[in-house]
Amino acid sequence: MKLPLLIKPVSVSGLRGKFLSAASCFHSFHSFSVFFLFLKFKDAINLKNLVCSTVKHSFSGIFTASTGTSNLPEVVAVALVNNIEASYCDSKIEKAIPKQDWMENLRDGEPEYWKEYAQDCAVNRLFFEEQFHILKRRLNQTTSVHILQKVIGCEWDDKTETSHGYQNYGFDGEDFLVFDLKTLTWIATKPQAVITKHYWDRQKTTNDLWKYYLTQVCVDWLKKHLKYGRISLMRTDLPSVSLLQKTPSSQVTCHATGFYPDRADLFWRKDGEELHEDVDKGEILPNHDGTFQMSVDLNISSIAAEDWKKYDCVFQMSDVKDDIITKLDKSVIRTNQSKTEMEIQSFAGASRISQQPQQSVLVYKRTSSVVQ
């Protein structure tokens, strides 16, 4: 089957399994370096496509190919089911590695499927070298480090049986090309991508194959993964919610960690109404154990002490009736400053002695939840 790659279609064994990703931050190998690349590119791959809405499941493949990075594999691949890492591969090991127990069951129960899965994960380095060469020349790039990334996948609503497919490309942390599933054409998000857009738009047969993959093959793959991973993927874990603060005068962070799935929301309220000003809301991020975390900051600089009781932090999860509500209360705030340090500062203030407070790091329930 011929697939449209960055500059021209090339022949590969099949559509499935081309999941290559900077989001291999989930994998321990080069995790920090790759996660940095993922953060750089998260806007370019349009992460809203990867976040499940209320009744949807998702199957996503993300890949990253790089040049000029000696400490990273040239290509890294990850397959995600409901935003949980299901399998991993890279150009050094050139084989698929199951990352969940239930994926091992899928591998053992569907040997032919897994064989194709593993074969398709192998990457032709020469192809990517060619694409980088063409792109660097076309985009007039002179630096040695370049990142080519792609996200492809689908969402499926198990209640309405409707689905949505998506496929995006990015280059050096910026949008490059987006596939329009309705018109079966490509959208150039940079002027330099227009040449490729016109070339790909003429590949009618290839674009029809992409439609077939995104609307049928991808959904079938998602259902197959849900079959083997149902117990794990369909569970509900409620979070631990904490109020955190670096210093008595800094913003208060409401932090929820350990929840699953990622169909959740976290926000501050005043007198029962959600706040949209003086708040800074973070994205939902993965924990190392397959759960998720998120946080939202509240600027307290203009809040009078007697008004604290009017504020609370609310955690909501899809399909869970009761919200988790945490009142803004100084007695429950966890801070980087120890009691002894605060007593020293209080004494120093009373004596008009300049005292530089020591800084410490407070590690919370999970290693990924650190105030620094």
Image (cartoon, rainbow, N blue to C red):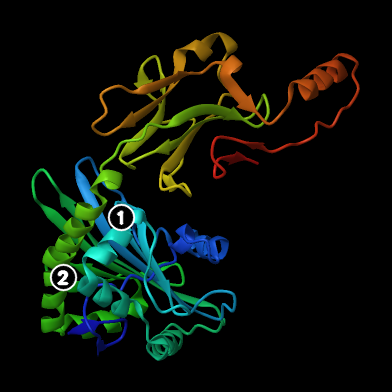
Q: Is residue 57 above or below residue 103?
A: above
Q: Position of residue 325 (x, y in %)?
A: 40, 20
The residue to which callout 2 is attached is 213
Disc 1 to disc 2, how far (Cα)? 24 Å
Q: Is residue 244 left or right of residue 8?
A: right
Question: Residue 195 sits in which quadrant?
Answer: bottom left
Q: Is residue 265 above or below residue 70?
A: above
Q: Is residue 364 left or right of residue 356?
A: left
Question: Residue at horizontal 74%, vertical 21%?
Answer: 339
Q: Is residue 173 above or below residue 365?
A: below
Question: Residue at horizontal 76%, vertical 36%?
Answer: 359
What label does residue 339 carry, if any? none
Tell me, yes or no, whether the two marked residues, 1 and 2, touch with CB atoms within 8 Å.
no
Question: Residue at horizontal 17%, vertical 56%?
Answer: 223
The one nearer the camera, 289 or 371, is 289
Tag 2 secondary structure: helix
Instruction: Give, as a three-letter code, the residue at label 2.
Output: Tyr
The one nearer the camera, 153 or 349, is 153
Mark earlier in primary sequence (1, 2): 1
Q: Quadrant of the N terminus?
A: bottom left
Q: Position of residue 190 (x, y in %)?
A: 35, 72
Q: Position of residue 169 (x, y in %)?
A: 33, 71
Tag 1 secondary structure: helix
The one nearer the camera, 359 or 17, is 17
The residue to which callout 1 is attached is 102
Image depth: mark 1 or mark 2 in front: 1
Question: Residue 96 sits in which quadrant?
Answer: bottom left
How crowded pointer 2 is (Cα within 10 Å; few <14, some 14-19, many 20+) is rated as many
Q: Position of residue 307 (x, y in %)?
A: 52, 11
Instruction: Give, as a three-letter code, the residue at label 1.
Output: Trp
